[in-house]
Image: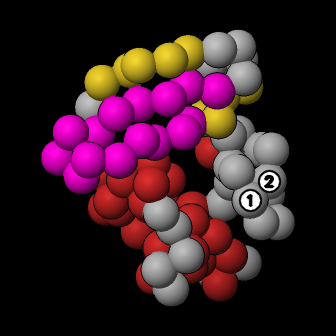
């Protein structure tokens, strides 16, 4: 993935494997959720289960889908851990 344009509010990457542009919305150099219930929130603030829900239902595209695929094991582990902890309380 190659960075081709960067501004204070977003970055544009060119993904040579898929041949499309990826617009990444940034806030203070952190990834930001572009839509939905958590729109405008940093990805670190978005619940893992919510990202998994969107991914499993094929609602994610572009850079957000790539992010979920690259972090799928961590998202699943944290969601399972959270669900286990909340059920035991």
Residue depicted at 82% across the width and 66% down the height: 37
Q: Nearer the viewer, residue 47 or 19?
A: 19
Image quarter in which the C terminus is found: bottom right
Residue depicted at 55% across the width and 25% down the height: 11
Q: Quadrant of residue 2?
A: top left
Identify the magenta region: 10-24
Q: Do callouts 1 and 2 mark residues in contact (Cβ within 8 Å)?
A: yes
- Residue 67 among those drawn in magenta: no
Residue depicted at 63% across the width and 45% down the height: 43
Coloring basis for residues: secondary structure
Regarding residue 28, the answer to whether it shows in the image is: yes
In the displayed structure, does residue 10 sit left or right of residue 68?
right
Q: CA distance from mark 1 to mark 2?
A: 4 Å
In the displayed structure, does residue 69 sit left or right of residue 78?
left
Q: Position of residue 54 (x, y in %)?
A: 56, 75
Q: Nearer the viewer, residue 83 or 11?
A: 11
Q: Nearer the viewer, residue 22 or 85?
A: 22
The outermost residue toward the left is 17
In this view, 23 is above or below 7: below
In the displayed structure, does residue 2 sit left or right of residue 25?
left
Image quarter in which the N terminus is found: top left
Mark 1 Cα within 10 Å, few/some/many (few <14, many 20+)?
A: few
Regarding residue 84, the answer to whether it shows in the image is: no
Residue with the mark numbered 1: 35
**At numbered mark 1, what does the secondary structure look like: helix, strand or loop?**
loop
Which secondary structure is most common in the magenta stretch? strand
In this view, 16 is above or below 27: below
Residue with the mark numbered 2: 39
- Residue 16 among those drawn in magenta: yes
């Amino acid at each position: 993935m190659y960075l081709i344009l960067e501004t204070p509010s977003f970055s544009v990457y060119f993904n040579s494997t898929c041949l499309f542009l990826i617009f990444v919305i940034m806030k203070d150099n952190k990834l930001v959720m572009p839509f939905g219930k958590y729109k405008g929130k940093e990805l670190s603030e978005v619940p893992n289960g919510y990202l998994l829900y969107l991914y499993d239902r094929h609602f994610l595209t572009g850079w957000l889908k790539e992010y979920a695929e690259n972090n799928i094991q961590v998202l699943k582990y944290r969601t399972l851990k959270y669900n286990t902890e909340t059920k035991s309380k």
